Image (tube, grey):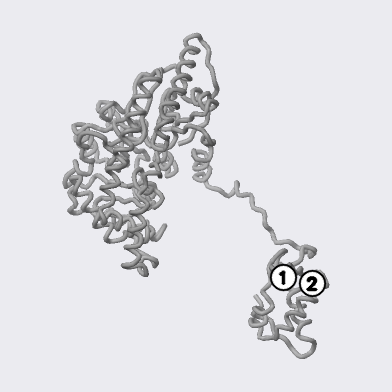
Amino acid sequence: MFNDFKADSESPAYMQLKGYIETLIEQGLMPLRHKLPSTRELAGLLGVSRTTVISAYEALERTGWIEAVKGRGNFVSRAVLHSEEPPGRIDWNSRLSPQAFLSEELDLMKHGIKWEKGMIAFTSIAPDEKLFDVNGFKRAFLDRISLEGDVLLNYGYAQGYRPLIQYLTNYMRSKGVEAADKDILITNGFTEGFDLMLTAIRRRSGRILCENPTHQTAIKMMKLHGFEPVGVTLEQDGLNMDELRRTLDEGGFDLAYLTPSYHNPTGIVTSPEKRMELLRLLGEHEVPVVEDGFNEELRYSGAHAAPLIACAGTGNSVAYIGSFSKILFPGLRVGWIMADRGLIGYLESLKRARTIHTSTIDQAVLFQYLHNGNFERYLKRARTEYKRKYELAVRGCRDYIPMKRMSGEGGLHVFVELEDRLDARAVLADCRIRGVVFTPGDIFFTDGKGRNTLRIGFSRVPEDRIEEGLKTIGLVVQEHAAAAAAGRLPGKEGNTHG
């Protein structure tokens, strides 16, 4: 704009500039309330005197084209009306894809129950920010910036920050993983890793095998990619193997998505025996596996079972997606995929085409934090704190909530199954009136079941309020059980928040 203005000697320069600006306004190139350059700036831009610009602006203001606002500058006047407004209305609903509508429909953060001040909210399974090692993070940031700050602020590599990749490779080796012929891709948390896998996998049957129930975000992502999640029932030690065999015999699967440790939402840890058997069965049917390393570090007693990718030995059928998000700084959005080297090469290209790379500075600061030895110290403290909350939650559920069973061997939540005749959403609606909310379990099921289940996340609930909240849930469950026995159904359906 203004670069085609040319003054001649036939009339005063300020009048020519006035007419030029009027034309820009009439053509809609300077819409209502558009701010004009300062007189000094425009004079330098056009190569005319500042007096010329001041005179032009004064003339425009006198005729109502612009308005001078003290201390702010000159703006296209609100009194000016354009005879022809450019088209500016689009019916976006008619232009959106089925994926857009489906994602909005499945958006629990948007449609879920809203937290209100004072509520006891068992809905979150995010880490408690009060435990974050902020000082350790500050030191890591300053250490890394002082070493290579100029590099970190530039573009990075799609595969990831090399020192972090090497650290994670050794970290996975410490879990018993055979790293030969495998590689790592850094991602923006679990969600990008799973999204890349779902994009990369060729759709043949269009079906993905998973636990039932399973991670609600994973269900949403599978559906958005056009896959049908097919769930296999979870027992207290992992998948029901007889059902798994029948399901595999019924037809092919493009992929299996499994969370063998501190499963979301049940908290179940699959036994070592079942891990080996399900790998054998999936191998026989040539079904590749995406393993979600959800909450693996949050064991509170005993030895943790080796991840599936470790159980697979030198095999390449398992792609492991890891993240520290449920334990360490989820705001960094740094995760990783460890898988067959050839597969990682294709996933790297997909990532480069979509997001170029994960924030280099986030990766580098995370590496420095890990390299400084902070993670082990932080994890020891976090386990102590979360174990105390876990024990409070388990004891409170057993003491106060009438139920069929409860699961959860670690992590940041427990899963409760009520009597079959009870509806957890109706319980939620009445609990909410009393200031307590939780996550109804049916959102985690692939087949519409689970109406009598609920997930209780305790990580961000103050210790002194855990028992209070569970007592309230227990009282409401008792009321609903009594009403159901009398043939009445109290309450109404509640919304969800996951």
Image position, residue 167 (x, y; %): 24, 55
Pointer 1 and pointer 2: residues touching (CB < 8 Å)?
A: yes
Residue at mark 1: 74
Q: Residue placed at 73% from the left, 75% from the top?
A: 21
Q: Count residues near mark 2 (Cα–Cα under 10 Å), then give few for <14, some for 14-19, many for 20+.
A: some
Quarter of the figure with the N terminus = bottom right
Q: Could you tell me which secondary element the residue under label 2 belongs to?
A: helix
| Residue 357: quarter of image | bottom left
Looking at the picture, tell me which residue is in the foreground, 251 or 182: 182
3D distance between C-alphas at marks 1 and 2: 9 Å
Horizontal placement of 357 versus 89: left or right?
Answer: left
Quarter of the figure with the C terminus = top left
Residue at mark 2: 61
Q: Residue placed at 32% from the left, 63% from the top?
A: 144
Q: Could you tell me which secondary element the residue under label 1 belongs to?
A: strand
Image position, residue 29 (x, y; %): 69, 69
Image position, residue 26 (x, y; %): 75, 69
Q: What residue type is labelled 1?
A: Asn
